[in-house]
């Protein structure tokens, strides 16, 4: 019968390796996966659409991009990251958690998220090339 004096040491090394991987995954997720979102406050006019909302709207603070999204949506996070990285003035309505967002989503017959409004352009989903082209067409980039 042979004994392995290093077996307890292997368990400690394995535990340390698992712990290290978990910590690294948490760091990567918080650093690269999460993104701080800019949610719209109050009524914001949908770019390119007739303003029919009652009450005063602050047009000088209107965003260049209005996004209808959802908290769980990875394409919405990618769009947000793109806007932040390119210093694009945008705001987002969460169509599931915000009454104004839910109403707008119904008004535009939303089918999936994100829906991006850039001037006269309405983009379903997120594609950096299409967003860049729309921004350039509107003279925003």
Image (spheres, helix red, strand yellow):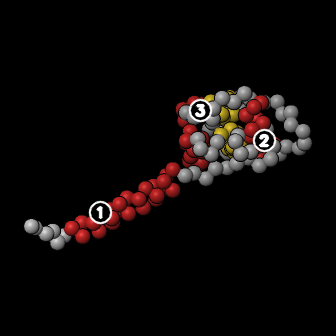
Marks 1/2: CA–CA distance: 51 Å
Mark number displayed over residue 125: 3
Horizontal placement of 119 versus 35: left or right? right
For label 1, the crowd category at 10 Å Cα-Cα, with few meaning under 14, some 14 to 19 and many 20 or more, is few
- Residue 2 point in image, percent of width and height: 10, 67
Instruction: Give whichever of 131, 15 is nearer the camera.
Output: 15
What secondary structure is marked by label 1? helix
Residue at the limit of the structure toward the bottom, as seen here = 5
The secondary element bearing badge 3 is classed as loop
Return the residue at label 2: 100
Chain-order first, disc 1 or disc 2: 1
Q: Nearer the viewer, mark 3 or mark 2?
A: 2
Please determine whether, in this image, residue 88 is positioned above or below residue 20.
Answer: above
Q: Residue at x 21, y 67 (%)?
A: 7
Residue 99 is at least partly visible in this image: yes
Who's the residue at 77% across and 30% down the image? 107
Residue 13, image x, y percentages? 28, 66
Q: Residue at x 89, y 44 (%)?
A: 56
Percent of width and height locating residue 31 = 50, 56
Figure check: 8 above or below 134: below
Sooner in the amino-acid sequence: mark 3 or mark 1: 1
Looking at the rendering, in which quadrant would you find the N terminus?
Answer: bottom left
Q: Give the farthest residue toward the right.
A: 55
Q: Which residue has dot 1 on it?
A: 14
Would you call the spot at circle 3 few (<14 residues within 10 Å), some (14-19), or many (20 or more)? some
């Amino acid at each position: 019968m042979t004994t392995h004096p290093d077996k307890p040491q292997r368990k400690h090394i394995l535990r340390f390796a698992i712990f290290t991987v978990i910590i690294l995954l948490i760091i990567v997720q918080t650093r690269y996966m999460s993104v701080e979102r800019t949610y719209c406050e109050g009524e914001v006019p949908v770019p390119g659409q007739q303003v029919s909302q009652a009450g005063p709207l602050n047009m000088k603070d209107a965003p260049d991009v209005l996004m209808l999204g959802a908290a769980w949506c990875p394409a919405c996070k990618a769009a947000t990251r793109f806007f932040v990285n390119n210093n694009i003035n945008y705001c987002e309505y969460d169509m599931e958690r915000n009454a104004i967002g839910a109403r707008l989503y119904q008004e535009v017959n939303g089918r999936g998220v994100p829906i991006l409004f850039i001037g006269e352009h309405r983009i379903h989903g997120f594609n950096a090339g299409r967003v860049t082209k729309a921004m350039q067409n509107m003279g925003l980039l």
